[in-house]
Image (tube, coloured by chain):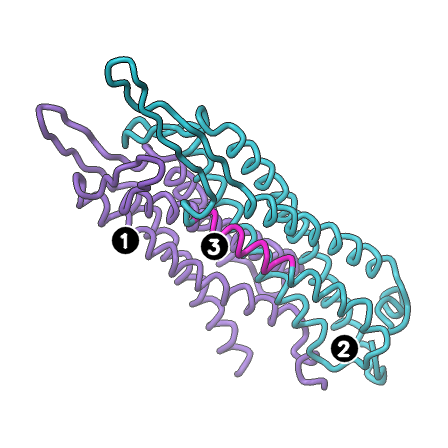
Chain colours: A purple, B cyan
């Protein structure tokens, strides 16, 4: 009975992480705003920044991976491989989130020393959607750290933890 | 049984030597990345305007503190190199200590967490450096590498060392996890063993 609840807990966690990564992906892809001033119209899309493109790609990879692992049968020998792949996916998530966060921070506050002006004042809705996508990405990251510890715990015999 | 004698205390096995070698390399790589980025500074006197025939010069500095991503880079690399130093010391001196249950598990978990930390730091610095090198014409941000070439070169060197550290930390985590799996198999099949 305990094993069943543990397994269901793991599945729920992975489903939640899949949902969060998918949400981050969708919110970032649909962010687009057109602003016009002084007869010059500029359109802000997520493809303008390389970091946002990397964020979209990384979250797509993580979503597809989570979806596939949801269907892995319990007695498969691949669970030991899933631990290492979970680590790689967590590293992918942290790197994409921190890169997008660094670029978005420059977009919001600018960088006075380099002469870069912030763009959030001109395209506020775009900035809000990017912020939402980053928050979803952060939730996916936290869930993935828990998933990593969970899959490590389920592969390593619990016997080991009780020995002291 | 083939997996039985791999992790007994007091023995220097192949995985022990491999792990120690990789940890030393990772320690040196992340420390080098942190030091090179922390000492990254360039001062240049540029002509900003000309009034009549007198050019007006301004002194501009490029420092790593100007970019939050680089500050995070330095701090994270210092933390990861300190972790590697601690793990090297633990590995060398654990041959005399008694095994206490959580030892190998905590090493594996800490290695995984530090691997994610260094990957986050290296990647955020890489994207900020790409922004500085190419600029962004959509947001009208000018590139700075044409004027501060030495700053960009040193930053690039630090980034390469950090990415080497990322790959090494990933391999170290894999080896730690496999040591954990082997030791747990050993426990589940060999119930009377006192130390590992």
Q: CA distance from mark 3 to mark 1?
A: 21 Å
Residue furthest to the top: B53
For the record, the magenta segment spans B69-81
Q: Is residue B101 above or below residue B79?
A: below
Across and down, in percent, residue B60 comes to 40, 34
Q: Quadrant of the C terminus of chain B?
A: bottom right
Q: Earlier in the sequence, mark 3 or mark 1?
A: 3
User: Disc 3 or disc 1, which is closer to the eye?
Assistant: 1
- The magenta stretch spans residue B131: no
Q: Chain of mark 2?
A: B
Q: Nearer the viewer, residue B159 or A91?
A: B159
- Helix, strand or loop at mark 3: helix
Residue identified by numbered label 3 = A66
Q: On the rendered structure, is B109 left or right of B124?
A: right
Looking at the image, which residue is at 57% across and 66% down?
Answer: A151
Question: Could you tell me which quadrant the N terminus of chain B lies in?
Answer: bottom right
Label 1, on which residue?
Answer: A132
Q: Indicate left or right for A27 with B100 as reference.
A: left
Task: Provide the residue designation for mark 2.
Answer: B188
On screen, residue B26 above or below B55: below
Question: Which chain contains the residue that carries disc 1?
Answer: A
Residue B78 sits inside the magenta stretch? yes
Nearest to the observer: residue B121 or residue B144: B144
Please state the horizontal and vertical placement of residue A115, each as a whole percent of the image: 31, 35
Residue B103 vs residue B191: left or right?
Answer: left
The spot of residue B86 in percent (x, y) is 70, 66
Toward the viewer: A12 or A89?
A89
């Amino acid at each position: 009975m305990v094993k069943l609840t543990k397994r269901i807990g793991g599945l729920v966690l992975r489903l939640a992480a899949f949902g969060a990564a998918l949400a981050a992906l969708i919110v970032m892809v649909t962010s687009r705003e057109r602003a016009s001033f002084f007869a010059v119209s500029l359109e802000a899309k997520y493809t303008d920044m390389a970091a946002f493109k990397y964020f979209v790609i990384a979250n797509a990879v993580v979503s597809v991976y989570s979806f596939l692992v949801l269907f892995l049968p319990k007695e498969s020998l691949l669970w030991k491989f899933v631990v290492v792949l979970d680590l790689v996916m967590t590293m992918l998530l942290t790197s994409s989130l921190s890169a997008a966060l660094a670029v978005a921070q420059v977009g919001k506050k600018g960088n006075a020393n380099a002469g870069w002006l912030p763009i959030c004042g001109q395209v506020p809705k775009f900035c809000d959607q990017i912020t939402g996508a980053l928050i979803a990405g952060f939730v996916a990251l936290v869930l993935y750290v828990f998933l990593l510890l969970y899959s490590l715990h389920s592969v390593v015999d619990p016997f080991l933890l009780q020995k002291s | 049984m083939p997996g039985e004698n791999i992790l007994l205390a007091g023995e220097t096995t192949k995985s022990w030597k491999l792990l120690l070698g990789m940890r030393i390399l990772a320690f040196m790589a992340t420390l080098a990345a942190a030091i090179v980025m922390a000492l990254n500074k360039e001062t240049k006197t540029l002509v900003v305007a000309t009034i009549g025939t007198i050019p007006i010069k301004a002194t501009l500095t490029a420092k790593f503190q100007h970019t939050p991503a680089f500050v995070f880079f330095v701090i994270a690399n210092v933390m990861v190199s300190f972790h590697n130093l601690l793990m090297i010391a633990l590995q060398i001196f654990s041959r005399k200590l008694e095994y206490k249950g959580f030892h190998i598990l905590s090493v594996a978990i800490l290695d995984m967490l530090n691997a994610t930390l260094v990957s986050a730091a290296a990647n955020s610095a890489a994207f900020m450096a790409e922004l500085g090198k190419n600029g962004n014409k959509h947001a009208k941000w000018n590139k700075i590498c044409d004027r501060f070439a030495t700053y960009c070169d040193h930053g690039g060197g630090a980034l390469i060392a950090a990415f080497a550290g990322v790959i090494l930390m990933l391999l170290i985590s894999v080896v730690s996890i496999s040591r954990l799996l082997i030791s747990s198999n050993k426990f589940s099949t060999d119930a009377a063993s006192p130390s590992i």
